[in-house]
Image (tube, rainbow, N blue to C red):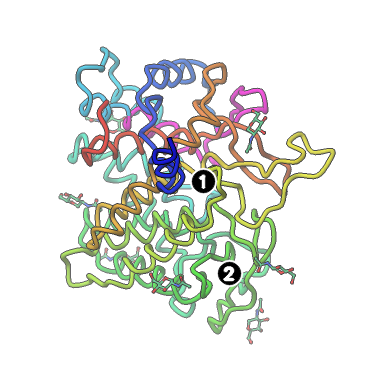
Amino acid sequence: MLFPILLLALSPVQASTVPSNLFSPLISSKILKTSNTLPSPIKYNQFTTTSGNWLFFVPDTWTSGFFPSTPYALDARAKLCPDQADSTNWVDLGRSLSTGLIPLEHSNTQGHDVGFLSMPFQWELLVNPQNETAIQAVNAFATDLAARYNPVVGCTRSWDTADPTDFTVIIDNMMNLQVLFSSYNLTGNTTLLSIALTHARTTIANHIRTDNSTWHVIEYNSTIGSVIRKRTAQGYADNSTWSRGQAWGIYGFANVYKQVLGTDNEDEVFLDTARGLASYFLDHMPGDGIVPWDFNAPAEGTGSPLAGVVPADSSAATIAANGLLLLAQVETNDDLKQKWIDGAINILDKITTLAWKPSWQSLLSNGTVNRPANNFATGIVYGDYYYITAGNMLVEMGLAQC
Ligand SMILES: *[C@@H]1O[C@H](CO)[C@@H](O)[C@H](O)[C@H]1NC(C)=O
Ligand SMILES: *[C@@H]1O[C@H](CO)[C@@H](O)[C@H](O)[C@H]1NC(C)=O
Ligand SMILES: *[C@@H]1O[C@H](CO)[C@@H](O)[C@H](O)[C@H]1NC(C)=O
Ligand SMILES: *[C@@H]1O[C@H](CO)[C@@H](O)[C@H](O)[C@H]1NC(C)=O
Ligand SMILES: *[C@@H]1O[C@H](CO)[C@@H](O)[C@H](O)[C@H]1NC(C)=O
Ligand SMILES: *[C@@H]1O[C@H](CO)[C@@H](O)[C@H](O)[C@H]1NC(C)=O
Ligand SMILES: *[C@@H]1O[C@H](CO)[C@@H](O)[C@H](O)[C@H]1NC(C)=O
């Protein structure tokens, strides 16, 4: 009897398996139900109450692109999993949900988040590359982001500030570079490409600590380009590592590398940076495999609804899983590739066990929108969106079956 016990004790942590809920029919039924409850004039769901009911926000909100992108992701799902597809016309639904975003092309207050607002139109171009409305939207949002570029700093400005020389860039901004790549692809305007690549290089220089964790916010002086301050906005402390920021970084740098691969701009520095951020993320996961809202956050004190617990962030988990899978797609080292895949599957497995909530309107619970602002223990629209796209990526990569 000793032998098997020893074997068990010596074997590495049990490998995770792809959670079947990634392909649950509840996903499409919840998305349809939510789309039928959006207010008129349209508002979009962003996060839920702590009992799982969606709260709705005007279109001029940074998260408005996620819900309209979700039906497109389910259209992609239907093509990947034809045996499970029903008769829903997901593209029609995506198109109709997107119409509320079109006025934002000409006027919005979302700063760098125009990249996120453009997402449904980027999805539309995968379905119909000729769609003029979508082409115009992607180009307009890209022009918006490009107008926020400062060559002295070498970045696009994330948030506006009262003092315009105080130039704020957050790690999240790496996600929004995609709209510049897409518009470059459509127009051939190399200025857009060069802005995206310079932003990424400046971010490597200033946002990443020597241990490959990330600062959330860097304030630059827009007149002279110097760094004024490094701090947090949504993390636990200035010097802590906010997990969603780290996750945006993994995805953002893996994506930049993917975009330059095979072009004159191919540069291993983007791959290496994504690797460093991914390693930090996986090497700092707690033993239970649940992504905490901040890698340095302590357990909640008495008086907190989650006293004694370090609150999870299910959205950081699903974003990181997407980033790790994207990194695996471009990884050249087989051992590292396996590490990114195993890491992604483990994160998805553990977050599904914790946060899959059939009784909630969202797919997942345990999201942390903003812990310092006391907004946590909710469902989050981008957590759900990236849960679905993670499932799609696993199927596309041959790592899961529907
Ligand atoms: C083009 O995309 C827009 C915006 O999503 C949509 O409203 C429209 O129906 C699409 N048109 C065609 C011809 O595909
Ligand atoms: C390319 O994009 C930049 C940034 O939006 C813009 O200033 C410039 O006019 C564009 N160039 C052309 C040829 O359209
Ligand atoms: C940026 O530098 C200029 C010139 O030195 C200075 O006048 C300005 O106050 C600085 N801005 C900030 C936010 O530090
Ligand atoms: C650019 O266009 C090509 C072909 O039209 C497409 O395969 C590729 O995915 C596009 N890339 C981006 C970033 O949109
Ligand atoms: C952050 O700074 C505080 C105060 O100096 C220190 O106690 C803490 O260990 C630091 N945390 C990290 C993750 O470096
Ligand atoms: C940080 O990441 C870089 C690039 O992947 C790597 O070379 C370096 O060893 C990493 N540093 C630490 C402390 O892990
Ligand atoms: C997850 O949310 C449930 C309530 O929905 C809560 O009881 C639990 O402590 C949370 N766990 C974490 C790690 O956030």
Is the distance from the Cβ of mark 2 to the nearest ligand 3 atom less than 8 Å? no
Locate residue 15: give its quadrant: top left
Count of picture labels:
2
Residue at coordinates 22% horizontally, 62% vertically from top-left?
A: 332
Q: Amino acid at mark 2?
A: Ile
- The residues colored magenta run 46-73
Residue 136 in magenta? no
- For the question of whether residue 44 can be seen, the reply is no
Q: Is residue 162 left or right of residue 226?
A: right
| Disc on res. 34 | none
Quadrant in the picture for the N terminus: top left
Q: Amino acid at mark 1?
A: Ala
In three-dimensional space, the C-alpha distance between marks 1 and 2, rounded to whole angstroms, equals: 20 Å
Residue 212 in percent (x, y) is at 49, 68
Q: Earlier in the sequence, mark 1 or mark 2?
A: 2
Which label lies toward us, 1 or 2? 1
Q: Which residue is mark 2?
A: 218
Q: Residues within 10 Å of mark 2 (few under 14, many from 20)?
A: many
Residue 242 in percent (x, y) is at 59, 56
Q: Which residue is mark 1?
A: 316
Q: Is residue 29 left or right of residue 337?
A: right
Quadrant in the picture for the C terminus: top left
Q: Secondary structure at mark 1?
A: helix
